[in-house]
Amino acid sequence: MASPEFNKLQAMDESQNKLRQQGGETSARPTTNGAVRRPPASREAAPGTTVGQVRARNAFLTAEDVNVHYGDIHAIKNVTLEIGRNEVIALIGPSGCGKSTFLRCLNRMNDTIESARVTGRIMLDGQDIYSKDLDPVALRARVGMVFQKPNPFPKSIYDNVAYGPRIHGLAADRSELDHIVHKSLDRAGLLKEVKDRLDEPGTSLSGGQQQRLCIARTIAVNPEVILMDEPCSALDPIATARIEDLMDELSENYAIVIVTHSMQQAARVSQRVAYFHLGNLIEVDETEKIFTNPRTKLTEDYITGRIG
Amino acid sequence: MAALRGTTRHAADRNKMALTTIVLILTGLAVAGYLAGARRAYASVGGPSNLRRLHSLPGYHGFFVAICCLLPALLVLLLWVVVEPRAVVVLVTQGLPEAARGLSEGELNLLINNIRNLAAGDVVSGQVDAMLTDAALRYTELSRLGRTLSAVLVFGIAVLGAVLAWRRIGTDFRARHKVESVVTGLLVAASSIAILTTIGIVASVLFEAIRFFREVPLTEFLFGLNWSPQTAIRADQVGSSGSFGAVPLFAGTLLITAIAMAVAAPVGLMTAIYLSEYAPPRVRDVAKPLLEVLAGIPTVVYGFFAALTVAPVIRSAGEAMGLAVASESALAAGLVMGIMIIPLVSSLSDDAIKAVPRAMRDGALGLGSTRSEAMLHVILPAALPGIVGGILLAVSRAIGETMIVVMAAGLAANLTANPFEAVTTVTVQIVTLLVGDQEFDSAKTLAAFALGLVLFVVTLCLNVLGLQFVRKYREQYE
Ligand SMILES: Nc1ncnc2c1ncn2[C@@H]1O[C@H](COP(=O)(O)OP(=O)(O)O)[C@@H](O)[C@H]1O
Ligand SMILES: [Mg+2]
């Protein structure tokens, strides 16, 4: 685990990206001695204990000992995970392992599911998001979410993007709203394609465009974190590539948590990868390490395609 | 005389029994045919071990024989039952003396009725003379003959059909397909009953309405402002010639429907919103069945609730405020009708809201909407076509509703928009026009058909429009 001193060091550093590019900084970590990094491949993690690097440099969103129950189903078991500022972290794992459930804890969308019960502590920028005096509605504006299936509202393209700013009162007048809508569409890489047809219904766009519209809608409320639940699983490869490029650009301003079933996608877009299995967080580490040198047999089996 | 009565009553009972017996025996024949057919199918391949060589399983061969036995025989029997009484009447009439045959049609009918009654042992009007007794005996005789003939014919056809079918059975005979086409035919026949009945009803309403419009011009009916359908029955009677301007009825219907929808649409919609989005499961589990109970209350119960409970309350409340309220007011009928329609609106709106994909709701909530913002801005607009469709169906229901308005709205055809006055509706007038002793050919009676036609056309349009909305909306999310 990263020591507090290490975190402080990272915080003092003026550029995250620069550090990432250095690539070799991991060798400085106290935990990354050879003995820990290369355990016997058969070693399994005990439930609730995670192998690897759950702490992030410059942590922004922190989940501590999170458990989620749906009635009798124990869907998330003692998960502890930190997500850094400006970090893209990918959650991978077989279907039903709890990736979406964990993601929904981070913006309290689980509150809308009647049977769901969340325990543990989740801190956003040092603030407990499950504390009584935090308004989940306001939280969801800070932690935006993009869903698996593009779900534009049955409104015009303009109104789709303007929806969030309108309900949160982010624009003082029409021209300011116009500005927010254009800027958001531009950042989502959609403006060029739709700027002459902002009055058309959002549902008239292609699947990939709809998903970028949903991303524009999310960033229009100026969130600090963006959660994406398999955002490309309903899209063709070209649309997928566009969204992946977009994620790269967005990571300059936001922390991004993405659930994906595609190893290639995880490898392309993320700096860290977290592997879930049956509600346990098995292993978290730098993307490259997970894919080249997984420490647990479960992770290795999954990324090499032996577990569906 | 008494002896004749005794034997003829006996004969009438036997007549009914004979029919039952024929059908029973036919069924027996069919069962036998089934067994024989199945057996022959087995035999044709030399036993159950070679069953695979049969084109169809033995059961199908059995069914084929049974159908060939039963179906033509039953058709002939049906024909016979329809034709026989007429034929017997014709034959009996021909046997009557010259004088009797010269009677007018009405008198002849009366005579034949008497003959039939005497033969059946029922009360006869007028004098029983020799001619009548003779004719009655002949009637009985012919009926008995007919019965015997029909039995012979029907059984003959049944056996013939069975034998012919039985002989066709063999390894390659496609009994399965034959049975299939017979089943298809039966299903088509069953479904055409409903369709043909509808067409028949529409046609009859249409024809009678056309007869009405020969006496009263269409324009007077549709645009006339005065409705008083009383016509003088006898020429010397004091009374108007009746006036058939239906506008007051349309206005009354519209007023009551508007009041009903003013209650049902908002309350029903809000109920649906609450139950589908806000209510905890426990409340939902109780409230939904309760609403269904509300929908199951007979309208006559709503009717007397309106007339005996709501109307007096409105009247006294109105008088306390210094308003003149009729004891039968449009308001009472409309309010209660609205309550009656709430479950319809709420269940259709509930369906529409439920059909909005969860993703839509999650999308709105994920952007930081409150539940009511998500409902107002995203879910309701998405569900709107379905809700509009549901409300149109409810309007059509309100327009056609009869019992509540008959009991609570009154009969006076006032042309008014004041909900405290008594008004009358199209349905109420149809009821009053047809209840009681009526001369069937008068304009007054025929007016009911014209009103019925208007009602039919309007509700049909509303239903088509409503279903169109609902369907279009379903497509949007599939
Ligand atoms: N709304 C729910 N109600 C009950 N159980 C649920 C619900 N959503 C998910 N689960 C259960 O929780 C587990 C994790 O599901 P999920 O988070 O959707 O997995 P993933 O996204 O990794 O495929 C599964 O066993 C699933 O059956
Ligand atoms: Mg999932």
Image: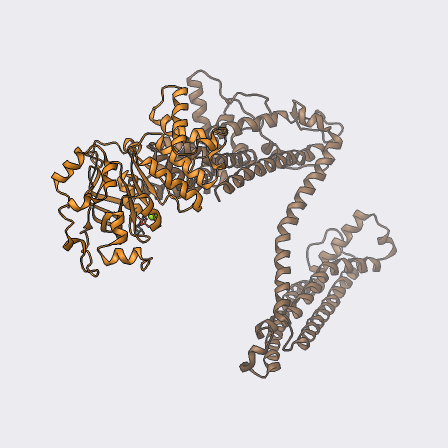
Where residue B264 appears, x then y in whole percent?
46, 32
Where residue B308 appears, x then y in whole percent?
46, 31
* Residue occupying the far right of the picture: B98
Left/right of residue B96 with respect to residue A250 in the rendered view: right
Q: Nearer the viewer, residue B432 or A229?
A: A229
Left/right of residue B450 with respect to residue B291 in the rendered view: right
> Is residue A73 in view?
no
Vertical order, B291 against A170 (above or below) = below
Give the residue displayed 63% in from the left and 25% down from the top: B247
Q: Determine the image quadrant of residue A214.
A: top left
Which chain does orange denote in the image? Answer: A
* Residue occupying the far top of the picture: B322
Left/right of residue A234 with respect to residue A95 in the rendered view: right
Image quarter where the N terminus of chain B lies is bottom right
> Is residue A37 in view?
yes
Q: Colour of chain B?
A: brown
* Residue occupying the far bottom of the picture: B46
Vertical order, A154 against A42 (above or below) = above
How many numbered tags mark residues here?
0
